[in-house]
Amino acid sequence: MDRRDFLQNTFALSAVVAAGQLLVSTPAQAEDNKAVAAIKSKHWQYDLQLKHTWTIARGSRDTATVTFFEIESEGVKGIGEAALSTAARYGETRDTVQQALSQVDLSAFSTPFQYGEIFAYIERLAPGQKAARAAIDIAIHDWLGKKLNVPLYRLWGLNKDKTPLSTFTIAIDTPEIMMRKTEEAAEFPVLKIKVGRENDEEIIAAIRKVTDKPLRVDANEGWKSKEAALERIKWLQDQGVELIEQPLPTSQLAETAWLRERVNIPLFADESVSGLGDIGKLHDAFDGINIKLMKCGGLGEALKMIHTARALGMKIMMGCMIESSVGISAAAQLSPLIDYADLDGNLLVSNDPYTGVKVVAGKIVLPDDPGIGVKLR
Ligand code: MG
């Protein structure tokens, strides 16, 4: 490594650590930058086709439209992705993503190494648009890794051998189809089962006929009272369920704290936690949080959330939407820091245009390629 590379690496690393505390440039500086060079960007939509109809407590779908965002600077490209939750749970739609990304003009910045300023600009431009912001954040992080020729996990000082197992998610369906999907997921040592409708017990009983693997259960806010949730969870504890995600609606935080005192398995927040600012109010009610890049706005925010949750003694899961290998490979770069992974969104689709992170016998295997480690298929 020559001196210039060393300085660049050192700067990037310290800036990653200090993310969020960076200064915003003045208009005069921005003008100067514009004169030096520019960052080009483009974005496009893509319809991911699901292998099976995806049904959770709040709705169903057969396709998921994602938006890719690409930057190019100094002859290096970086790719990111925006993906949305089922039934637009977080208030973003394909149109709002499109609108937000269409407004983005990075030509005022001379290099993606000014990412602290760039993220501050994006936050001002599209404050509530977390998925759109994640697309830009991922593209810039991918560029940084590619420019420095290092995978992001290495830039963050993480050990790729410490990646967790990932669950494979069985969405809601008839008990017969859920049994078949369970058999198809033979490679995965832990399964995540979507529940939260009337026939939860029938579903779990059917799955237990074909497997004795540990199960994690996601109610997606589907149980509507604390008493109903308590009854279901007590039964699930006896079925080898090791954790419950989002048992009650977001609005029922006090009820969730009541529930937590009465059950013996950890409760994880998902819909209740969109970003750093939510974590402080959750730690009485939940044992852990499920971080998703598309909810929180990208890798920079996710890293801050991981450290904050750890400081509060909480467990950490990383999850995903229905996404291509771009979003999943980005999230997986942080996975050596977490306890539980549910990073299977790309495995549920039949036409992923990219390859990147792999899951081998349930374990996340990070690629050695730089940045987020993806390639066009
Ligand atoms: Mg969930």
Image: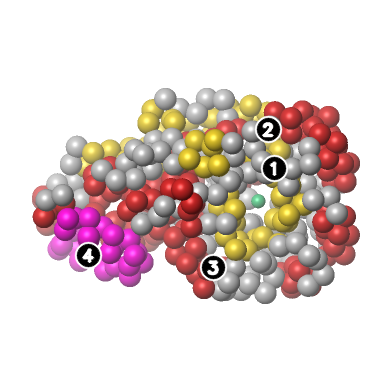
Residue designated by label 2: 185
The answer to whether the residue bearing label 2 lies less than 8 angstroms from the nearest atom of ligand 1 is no
Cβ–Cβ below 8 Å for labels 3 and 1?
no
Residue 113 in the image, given as x and y percentages of width and height: 24, 54
Residue 86 in the image, given as x and y percentages of width and height: 64, 43
Q: In the figure, is residue 60 to the left or right of 64? A: right
Q: Earlier in the sequence, mark 1 or mark 2?
A: 2
Residue 132 in view, yes or no: no
Q: Residue 45 or 155: which is nearer the viewer?
A: 155
Residue designated by label 4: 25
Q: Which residues are magenta?
A: 6-30
The crowd level at tag 2 (other Cα within 10 Å; few <14, some 14-19, many 20+) is: some
The three-letter amino acid code for the residue at tag 4 is: Ser
Q: In the figure, is residue 298 to the left or right of 217? A: left
Instruction: Measure the C-alpha gap from mark 1 to mark 2.
Output: 8 Å
Residue designated by label 3: 309
Which residue occupies 85% across, 62% down? 230
Residue 125 in the image, given as x and y percentages of width and height: 38, 56
Q: Earlier in the sequence, mark 4 or mark 1?
A: 4
